[in-house]
Image (spheres, grey):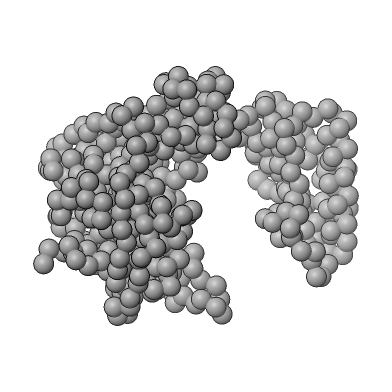
């Protein structure tokens, strides 16, 4: 029986490095998949470009991650599937070749999946934002990016053409795994139940360590062994079966419970999980223990793919400034409240023009805000976080000019958060829309040694 093993190298750009090396050494893989894009990293990439247009548009951790594993992957025949191309997949492909050369690899083929970038056209399509209903055209002068979530077809094309490494722009996370499975089993892209099988595998693995016990532990309720040595998951897939496991001799746990949590993670409607290649119905999915740290996945049905693709539009939204002041000892909360009132009065004195001012007490009400319960005990220490959202960098800069003097003319024993560098940054807000898929063009470009 033809069986394919895929390993989840990363869940996002700043994930841990060491589990990837373990997967390559002990995972007996055919595919190593790097999911490094998220909505946060898309915004972050655009912010970096605004600050320095010469900044490479691919994942800044691409070199560090691939340098340690690319030679062994090539020697073992492990193909690398990665969305580390971000805004510039062709530049990422060139960097992969440089890394390969530095590792003494003499022959390697890299595919760059391009397309889905609609920045120059999105304002002319007569579309509205899903979140607000506003016309995108009204934000024409503030648009910095518009990127579609692509599907798995281009990955299949790259593999059919002999690519050892595939780097992509923004694709739907699960498609990193659907692509190699569709290639290996020669699935038709209108065979919805096969495509949903690959989508389920991809959704379970896309957050890497989460299905192996990461983001799961709750001491005393859900205990996870050796979480500091968490191993990343492996999918073992045949035409008839799916098993989720992890590399041997690693921390964490793969159980029916971790799989259930991950299956429902970030899914609004489990009966209609809309992906670029298929609409997945997870309501018939079941999990069955198949041994220690091994779970069989059963069920799941698919429906025809949607006629549109989701596009994230990046909009300039001014600047954010953030500062913190610390108080400890008797009367800490009262001094923090006094500091808050002083700052609000000073903001009025200087005529601060802020779209939003947020003041939180970290550890008391910064997460659930007004819904936070009143503390049962008087806190010994309090951190007052102050954040401004403004239209201009000049207005945002006023926060530090008012916070820094608090060290000498605020309440008793006011502590200043360090470091004392610039804590003002531009904001790129992300909004979504749906674009007819025929408006989205793609291409696959190859580079090789």
Residue 221 sits in quarter: bottom right
Residue 381 sits in quarter: bottom right
Name the residue located 12 percent from the left edge and 63 percent from the top edge: 2
- Give the percent coordinates (x, y) of residue 244: 30, 68
Asked if residue 414 is positioned above or below residue 430 in the image, the reply reads below
Does residue 73 appear in the picture of this structure?
no
Name the residue located 80 percent from the left edge and 36 percent from the top edge: 402
Q: Looking at the image, which is closer to me, 75 or 9?
A: 9
Name the residue located 41 percent from the left edge and 45 percent from the top edge: 37
Q: Looking at the image, which is closer to me, 45 or 306?
A: 306
Does residue 444 appear in the picture of this structure?
yes
Asked if residue 293 is positioned above or below residue 13 in the image, the reply reads below
Q: Looking at the image, which is closer to me, 356 or 84?
A: 356
Q: Quick one: quadrant of the C terminus?
A: top left
Q: Is residue 280 left or right of residue 346?
A: left
Asked if residue 303 is positioned above or below residue 379 in the image, the reply reads above
Name the residue located 78 percent from the left edge and 40 percent from the top edge: 403
Residue 448 sits in quarter: top left
- Give the percent coordinates (x, y) of residue 75: 14, 55
Q: Quick one: quadrant of the N terminus?
A: bottom left
Q: How many marks?
A: 0
- Give the percent coordinates (x, y) of residue 332: 84, 59
- Give the percent coordinates (x, y) of residue 39: 48, 43
Q: In this view, does 160 lie to the left or right of 195?
A: left
């Amino acid at each position: 029986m033809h069986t394919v093993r895929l390993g989840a190298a990363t869940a996002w750009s700043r994930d841990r490095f060491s589990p990837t090396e373990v997967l390559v050494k002990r995972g007996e893989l055919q595919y190593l998949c790097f999911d490094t894009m998220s909505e946060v990293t898309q915004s972050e990439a655009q912010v970096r470009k605004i600050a320095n247009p010469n900044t490479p548009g691919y994942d800044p951790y691409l070199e560090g991650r691939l340098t340690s594993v690319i030679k062994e992957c090539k020697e073992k025949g492990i193909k690398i599937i990665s969305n580390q191309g971000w805004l510039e997949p062709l530049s990422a492909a060139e960097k992969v070749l440089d890394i390969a050369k530095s590792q003494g690899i003499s022959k390697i083929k890299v595919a760059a999946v391009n397309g889905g970038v609609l920045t120059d056209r999105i304002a002319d399509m007569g579309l509205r934002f899903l979140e607000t209903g506003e016309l995108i055209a009204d934000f024409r002068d503030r648009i910095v990016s518009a990127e579609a979530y692509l599907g798995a077809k281009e990955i299949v094309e790259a593999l059919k053409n002999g690519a050892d490494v595939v780097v992509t722009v923004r694709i739907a996370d699960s498609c990193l795994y659907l692509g190699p499975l569709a290639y290996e089993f020669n699935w038709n892209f209108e065979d919805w139940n096969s495509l949903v099988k690959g989508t389920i595998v991809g959704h379970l693995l896309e957050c890497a360590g989460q299905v192996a016990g990461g983001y799961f532990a709750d001491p005393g309720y859900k205990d996870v062994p050796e979480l500091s040595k968490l191993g990343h998951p492996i999918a073992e897939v045949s035409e008839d079966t799916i098993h989720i496991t992890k590399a041997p001799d690693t921390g964490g746990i793969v159980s029916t419970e971790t799989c259930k949590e991950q299956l429902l993670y970030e899914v609004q409607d489990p009966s209609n999980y809309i992906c670029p290649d298929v609409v997945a119905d997870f309501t018939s999915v079941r999990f069955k223990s198949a041994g220690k740290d091994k779970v069989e996945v059963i069920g799941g049905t698919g429906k025809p793919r949607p006629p549109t693709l989701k596009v994230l539009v990046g909009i300039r939204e001014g600047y954010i400034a953030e500062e913190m002041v610390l108080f400890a000892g008797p009367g800490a909360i009262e001094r923090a409240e006094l500091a808050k009132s002083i700052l609000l009065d000073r903001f009025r004195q200087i005529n601060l023009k802020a779209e939003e001012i947020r003041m939180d007490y970290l550890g008391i009400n910064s997460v659930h805000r007004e819904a936070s319960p009143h503390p049962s005990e008087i806190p010994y220490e309090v951190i007052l976080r102050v954040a401004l959202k403004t239209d201009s960098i000049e207005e945002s800069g006023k926060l530090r000019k008012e916070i820094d003097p608090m060290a000498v003319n605020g309440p008793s024993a006011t502590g200043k958060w360090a470091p004392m560098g610039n804590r003002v940054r531009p904001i790129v807000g992300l909004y979504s829309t749906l674009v007819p898929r025929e408006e989205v063009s793609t291409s696959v470009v190859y580079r090789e040694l």
